Amino acid sequence: MSYLKSYKRLNRLIQNESFEPLISWGLRMALSGTLPVIWGLATGRVIDAVWITLTAEAISWVEMKGSFAWRVRTLMTGAFLAILFAMFGTVIGYSVWLSVTGMLIVGFLATLLKDIGDRASGLAICVYLLFIICNAYPATEYIVLKHRLALVAIGAAWPVIVGIIISLLMPAQQPFRRQIALIWRAIAALVETTSRNAGNPRSNEVYAKENDVRTAMDNSYQFYGRMAHQANTDRQQYQLILLRKTAGLVSVNVIAMGEEMAHIAIPELNESLRIKAAALLSALKEAANRISVFVITLKPEEKLLAVSHINRLKNLAGLIRQYPLPVEEQQNKAIKRILQLSDRTARLLENAILRVEQMGEDVPVFRSYSLAKTLFLLKPKYLLRNAGFLFNFSTLTTRYALRSAIAAAIALFIYKWFHIDHGYWLPFSVMIVIQPYFGATFKKAIDRIAGTLLGGLAGSLLLRLPTGLHIKEAILFLTFILMVYYIRKKYAFAAFVITLNLVLLFNIESAYNNGLMVTRALCTIGGALLAVFSGFALLPTWDKKWLPSHLAGAINSNYEYFICTFFSAASGSSWTKNKRMVESKNSDVFDSFNRYMQEPGTQKSEVYYDLITSNVRITRNLNNINLEQDEKKTEQSLQLPVIQQARIDECLEYFNKFISYLPQFDPGIVIKRKECPDDVSSPIRLNDVQMVFLEKIIIELKAMIQGIEKLLGTGIAD
């Protein structure tokens, strides 16, 4: 039994590695960081090896998620930044005031890079780590500077070479497939949560899983933002983009099924029917899971399993149709609607498998990129276009960058002015701990302090071991892997391993020093406390202030989605784009609300939650209306029955009344208001199902108007 559990655990680890290759990332870092140390020990040039390893480690933090082109450009950019800021820190390190000024510049630039997200957060480490460490050991002679830059250049070139070689061996479309597979896995988790909360589609847990799907979609667009019409000359990318779109439609159907479950008295159903209904959702979850694995592995056996679960889904839907349905009309309609959505979802799942098959063989990069094509990736126009992301300023980004820069500069001034031995851990800790929002900064500070203290203690004990056993070198190799593996899973443990790694790296042949360990611990605590304090005192970002603005943006985006759906002739071709935009806005405001509830202070309003969830449900209903429109096979009529048009106009009137309040939430908001037309009809004809969704939108708008008037009346939104 224990053998079986170990096998399952190993199998799960291998499968997770396929989705998020953290171990392979750690091995890449371990290879880049450990070999120079071995060279240094063999040649007696340990200090030189430490500089090479430090640079290699900084660049290895660049996460290689995107295409081969993205990886090459990012690695080359990381190498350039590492050399540039190593030289910058080395040259000005002799002067306190020049160092503080330099830290202001570096802190601002590195924070802009961190704020971009996965695309550039690793580059931020290349900037501030090399600057801070090199600034702590300045060079006043040209020969020292020249030697330092040579070591940094070697350290920069080594992980670039390792990263490019690894990338050349990977299948060309694997990174994109991995992003899409994560979307399908998030959908499987959404199905499971929807099943567990059957009858309660407004559960906060369901909203959170829906948000996870949206986050996975957004992450995919960060690296692969092309649309299908932009990639129609690239067969593989074209099919993958359509596969991503299919995943988005499946998630809409799953959410719609959850909404319908609220109308069914599940305990009153026939037991056999309940079992088959639960099995139907289980089959849907397993089908999404197997498709996610098939997308990333392309193994025929995974396709076979996915097809098996899809067939099971269709068979279960057929069996449920054979049962006598409840007499109560609302429950009867809900069950029929769920079965209809199940059929549509099964077709979408089959389409997803077809897209993967039509993509064809995914050959390694070295077979799809010629040398000339690879060199073409480094053209200045591409590098400048990527640099444009860095200077996409917003109020929040600028405040965060300034706060980080000032806090780090203060930390560097303290350690330079008071000549604290190894005091560079002060600004280093500030740059690691500080986050855009107070709650995240406070949590990371706690994790950082706990991990650093324990890591320093463990490192101190390890330094007592005899050097001849090479245990320290072996543990150093292991720490490279573990700190990458836990950096997103459990930051406290990652901080422990990072501290252990740095202690071993800087003391690979040094004697144990109690004073140095204490200094490092105190500097880490001081840096973390300074980061937390800056969240209060230096241009603080409180969601109590920004939540109304996020909410106004999400509501306005829904308004534009409504206008596009009912009053635009091109609504059918662009509704998925509007869906994606408004769901991203909903995700932003949902995250903002969660941060708002965690902020210090007593006056909080749950009305915000009601407004946010109502706005999400309006998006869901608009999605369902557009999905129904896509399913129609008959030609659309340009004339609507009078009753339908009247309800559409009534919905527009409620929307217009509601958005008139938005400037009180965000004075700078731009609203493209549309008045109720006198002689213009909506270009789509609504069926009975769509009319139900329209009625639900009207109900939500009425509730939102009452909620926003209540919120403004309390003064909390001011």
Image (cartoon, rainbow, N blue to C red):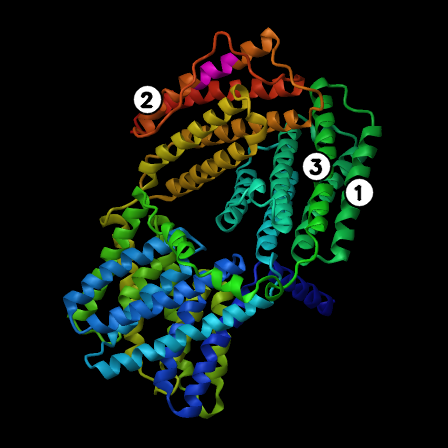
In the image, 257: left or right of 453?
Answer: right
Q: What x and y, as percent, mark residue 509?
A: 38, 87
Q: Residues within 10 Å of mark 3 (few under 14, many from 20)?
A: many
Where 473 falls versus 593 (above or below)?
A: below
Sequence order check, earlier mark of 1 and 3: 1
Q: Nearer the viewer, mark 2 or mark 1?
A: 1
Name the image quarter holding residue 543.
top left
Task: State yes or no: residue 322 in magenta.
Answer: no
Give how far apart the Cα atoms at labels 3 and 2 are.
Answer: 44 Å
Q: Nearer the viewer, mark 1 or mark 3?
A: 3
What is the magenta range? 649-655
* Residue drawn at x 35%, y 87% as measured from the top left: 510
Where 193 falls versus 112 (above or below)?
A: above
What mark, if any, has residue 345 been given in the picture?
3
In the image, 514: left or right of 269?
Answer: left
Tag 3: residue type? Thr
Give how far apart the Cα atoms at labels 2 and 1 are.
Answer: 54 Å
Give how far apart the Cα atoms at labels 1 and 3 are.
Answer: 13 Å
What mark, if any, has residue 312 been given in the picture?
1
Residue 703 appears in the figure: yes
Q: Nearer the viewer, residue 201 or 37?
A: 37
Q: Residues within 10 Å of mark 1 (few under 14, many from 20)?
A: some
Q: What x and y, as percent, mark residue 218?
A: 50, 45
Tag 2: residue type? Gly
Q: Are marks 2 and 1 in contact (CB under 8 Å)?
A: no
Helix, strand or loop under label 1? helix
Which residue position is annotated with label 2? 713
Tag 1: residue type? Arg
Q: Nearer the viewer, mark 3 or mark 2?
A: 3
* Residue drawn at x 68%, y 51% as measured from the top left: 359
Where 715 falls versus 475 (above or below)?
A: above
Helix, strand or loop under label 3? helix
